[in-house]
Image (tube, rainbow, N blue to C red):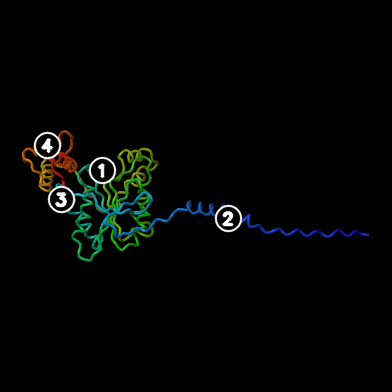
Amino acid sequence: MTATPPAATPPADTPPAGAATLAAVLPVLERIAAALERAAPVPPAPVDLTAADAFLWGPERRLIPVPRVNRVAIGLLTGIDRARDTLVENTRLFAAGLPANNALLWGARGMGKSSLVKAAHAAINAARADGALPLKLVEIHREDIEALPDLMATLRADAHRWIVFCDDLSFDGDDTSYKSLKTALDGGIEGRPENVLFYATSNRRHLLARDMVENERSTAINPGEAVEEKVSLSDRFGLWLGFHKCSQDEYLAMIRAYVARHGLKAEPDRVRAEALEWATTRGSRSGRTAFQFIQDLAGRLGQRLEG
C-alpha cells in the first residue's frame, strides 16, 4: 500500500509594509528621482532668429546672436574694387532670391577679405526695400566645420536668406574634415538649402597646403586621382575672388580714406611719411597694416576712432 504524501503547507502571506517602512523609503526615492532629473540634459531654448542680423554657430551647435558686428564701412575698402563690386552683386542677387554662387575669397593676408564679406552683408541690408526680410550672416569657425551639415539643416526651414561665413579656412596634414565641407556645399541627396550661401576666406587658393597636395602626388598609387580629390574642394565655389598685395599708391589711398573718415587732424605730408615708415618696418603693405597705422596715429593725436 502506497503511503499518501502529506499535503504541502501553503506559504504564509507576506505582511504589508508598515507605515514606518514607507516613511523611511519615500525620502530616498524622492532624492533618487531628483538626482535623475538633474542629470538629464536640459533642452536648449529655441533661438529667436529675429534677435539679430548676425549670429555665431557655437560649439554646442546652436546659434548665438551677435548684437553688433565688428565691421568696416564698405566705402573704406579701397584697392579691391573689382572683388568688392563682384561680391556685392553676387550677394544682392542672392538676397533678392535669384541664383548666386558660393564664394571663395583667397590671397594675400590683410587685404580685406573678411572685412569685405561683413561689409557686403551690411550694404545689402542697408539698401533693402521696406518690409523685406533682412539678409542674415552666420559665422562658423574652422574648428567646427564638421558641424556645417547640422547648421545647414537648422537654417533650411527658416524664411530668411543666410550667408554662412568661415574665415581663414584651410586644411593641413591628415585633417579630413574638408570632406564634410564638400558634402555640405554639394548638399548631398537633399541639395544645398536654397536659402543658404557659403562664403569663405583663405590665404590658399585650393584651401590645402601645397606640401599636402605634393605628398599625395608622390605617395599615392594613383597620384592624379588623389590630387584631384583634394583640390576639387575649391571647385565647389562658383565664385573665386583673388586678393593680391597692394601697391604703395593703393596703400596711401587707404591711409587717406581712413584719415578723412575719422577726421584725424594731421599734416598730410607727415601722415604720408609716417605711413610709409610704418609699412617698411613691418615689411608689408595691406589694408590691415593701414588700419593699424591709423590706430597708432589716432592714439598719438588723442582722437577717438568712431565706428
Q: Amino acid at mark 2?
A: Leu
State the residue position of label 4. 276
How far across and down, in percent of the image, does residue 36 sit? Answer: 51, 53
Q: Secondary structure at mark 2?
A: helix
> Is 137 on the left-hand or right-hand side of 288?
right
Quarter where residue 107 is shown: top left
Q: Which mark is residue 26?
A: 2
- Few, some or many residues within 10 Å of mark 1 (<14, 14–19, 20+): many
Q: Secondary structure at mark 4?
A: helix
- Few, some or many residues within 10 Å of mark 3 (<14, 14–19, 20+): few
How far across and down, in percent of the image, does residue 286 sit? Answer: 17, 41
Mark 2 and mark 1 lie on one chain; the one further toward the N terminus is 2
Quarter where residue 47 is shown: bottom left
> Is 78 on the left-hand or right-hand side of 235?
left
Mark 1 and mark 4 lie on one chain; the one further toward the N terminus is 1
Count of residue discs:
4
Quarter where residue 86 is shown: bottom left
Mark 2 and mark 3 in contact? Answer it, CB < 8 Å.
no
Q: Residue furthest front?
A: 20
Mark 3 and mark 1 lie on one chain; the one further toward the N terminus is 3
Is 165 in front, or is 242?
Answer: 165
Q: Amino acid at mark 3?
A: Asp
State the residue position of label 1. 203
Mark 4 and mark 2 lie on one chain; the one further toward the N terminus is 2
Mark 3 and mark 1 in contact? Answer it, CB < 8 Å.
no
Q: Amino acid at mark 4?
A: Leu
Q: Amino acid at mark 1?
A: Asn
State the residue position of label 3. 81
Q: Secondary structure at mark 1?
A: loop
